[in-house]
Amino acid sequence: MQLGQMLALAVVQGVTELFPISSLGHSVIIRAIFGWHISKASPDFLPFLVVLHVGTASALLFYFWRDWRDILAGLWRSRGRASNEQARLFWLLVVASIPAGLIGLLFEKRIKLLFANLLVAAIFLIVNGIVLLIGDVLKRRRPDHTLEHMTWGKALVIGAAQALALIPGMSRSGVTVVAGLGKGFDYAVAARFSFLMATPIIGAAAVLEVPKLFRITGHIDLGGIFLSGVLAGGFAYLSTWILMRYFRKQEVQALRPFGYYCLMAGAAALAWYFA
């Protein structure tokens, strides 16, 4: 991989992983439009992906460090039981992480076949836009709950929605925020739960790939890979900061701009594909 490609994809990852517009879908579309034929067999490819995910997970952990401090302290005080609010939130996040984790493990090979498919990414980016617009409709019809109202069933539903993000074009943050809206939470609460849920699952994806790094042979651009991870993390933190403030100020139609963007970007990608 060339350094310019690494840095560009790192910025795309950092921004679109948290914004509800699909990081995987944008990665597929950008590579296709610019004709970047990046081989998965390249010795740089796996370390690059792992470091990008580490950067994104680190940014989320840094932004929500007070939440995680309180969650872990509550878990320690309860000795692992869901007997206080913080410990209960920890186990709710665990429950929410199960569906996507299981589906990812069971269908890993089939899902990977879609990763470089421009047509799939374009179509599902349009689908993602429709889902976001539906989310705004759900928000108008539901009461606003706090995380104290989160139940095991609601957490499981939101976690199941997260599994849709395994398809290029579907946004992890988008579908989970919409699922949260559908369960009666406002934008800020749904986004907070979504981002807290993202930290362990993105981190776990990186950790699972780390052992493979020791089997890599050939020259890799460590400097470029490290810089890419820093860029991805920096932009992920900035994206989280912007989005959390944006969602706190919006009471209606907060997802509409992102929904329209996905519809236009998906349509443009389709036009490019069939041109």
Image (cartoon, rainbow, N blue to C red):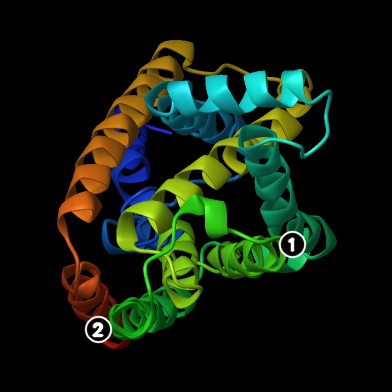
Q: Mark 1 or 2 closer to N-term?
A: 1
Between label 1 and label 2, give the one nearer the viewer: 1
Disc 2 crowd rating (10 Å Cα; few below 14, some 14-19, many 20+) is some
Q: Helix, strand, or loop for circle 1?
A: helix
In front of the other: 154 or 209: 154
Res 8 visible: no
Task: Name the residue rendered at 57%, 46% in the picture.
Answer: 197
Quarter of the image holding residue 102?
Answer: bottom right
The residue tagged 1 is 99
Residue type for callout 2: Ala
Left or right of 126 on screen, residue 219:
right
Quarter of the image holding residue 85?
Answer: top right
**Residue 242 higher or lower than 172, as above or below:** above
Q: Residue 133 carries which label?
A: none
In front of the other: 244 or 203: 244
Disc 1 and disc 2 in contact, CB within 8 angstroms: no
The residue tagged 2 is 267
Task: Name the residue rendered at 26%, 40% in the picture.
Answer: 239
Picture coordinates of residue 257, whole percent (x, y):
16, 70
Query: Where is the C terminus found, in terms of image quarters?
Result: bottom left
Residue type for callout 1: Pro
Res 142 visible: yes
Query: Where is the N terminus found, in terms of image quarters?
Result: top left
Q: Helix, strand, or loop for circle 2?
A: helix
